[in-house]
Amino acid sequence: MSKKLGLALGGGGARGVVHIGFLKALEEAGIKPDYISGTSMGAVVGGCYAAGISVDEIREAVLKLKTMDLVDLNAMAFTRLSLLRSKKLQNLFLKYLGDIKFEELNIPFTCTAVDMYSGNLYVFDKGSVATGVQASSCIPGVFKPVEHEGMLLVDGGVLCRVPVRQVKALGPDVVVAVDAIKYTADPVTQIPNLIAMLLRVFDILDNVNVRRERAESDYPCDLLLEPELAGMSQFEVKNLDKAYEEGYQLGKDNIQKIQELLKD
């Protein structure tokens, strides 16, 4: 009997489409994850996959996205908690995930969010998958936070870009992580607007956390994969095909390594 595989799928906005291609490569090789944990876009892809939505269906839905599908300008942005409303985002998740509960998923799955009141990481492992995925992907200051059980929840990437420890807690023998943003933020030549400024601050702080966590001796990752997506921003929806293909090739290139890790 082969070892149990856990996938940690990290955040990254549009760059996170690499996760779809990566899952497709695993599927073609006959490898199915036993556990998944996701953050932000990794939560979107991982949650849909764990719910039984096929890789091809996830790809089709995501590649159809345009910026205006998600943008719903908040006229009261400077007196409320976000530049954009979240209704369109919420409706998108409900369309595909409906009222599925974590307890009903085909594959055990968790996703991360951060409570803005306490500053603590929160791991969704029960209740509505759509709510968990929405909270995990609510970029702070950009999308309206999710109110849940007395908490005000935003993107899990604030504290946990790639949920390696969270998937390890589910019990796999082998943990494979995919980081769509990579170890160090790509340099930029311009910051054209307020949203870009917020995202840049987020990236810089995030990378400090990532470097610190990966330096810890007990970091429970057996294989860390980082796709090459130089120059692609988190909101660059015009290059989603590129991200998918990069993820697919990343998977193909590492199938043998993963198979070796899964051998008894």
Image (cartoon, rainbow, N blue to C red):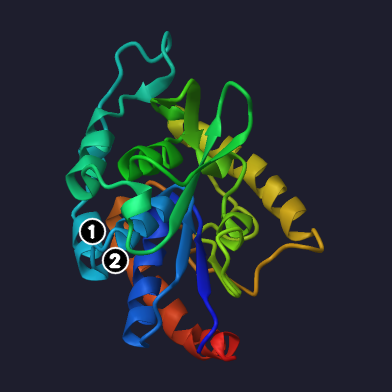
Where residue 79 sits: x, y (%)?
A: 42, 8
Residue at image location 23% in from the left, 33% down from the top: 88
- Classify 233 as above or below 264: above
Q: Which mark is residue 72?
A: none
Q: Quadrant of the rendered structure where residue 104 is?
A: bottom left
Residue at image location 31% in from the left, 42% down from the top: 130
Q: Which mark is residue 241?
A: 2
The kind of secondary structure element at disc 1 is helix
The type of residue carrying mark 2 is Asp
Quadrant for the C terminus in the image? bottom right
Q: Residue 192 versus residue 161: which sits nearer the camera?
A: 161
Q: Residue under circle 1?
A: 63
Q: Residue 122 versus residue 205: which sits nearer the camera?
A: 122
Residue at image location 65% in from the left, 56% down from the top: 184
Q: Residue furthest right?
A: 217
Q: Quadrant of the rendered structure where residue 222 is?
A: bottom right
The type of residue carrying mark 1 is Leu
- Classify 14 as above or below 116: below
Q: Is residue 215 something that shows in the picture?
A: yes
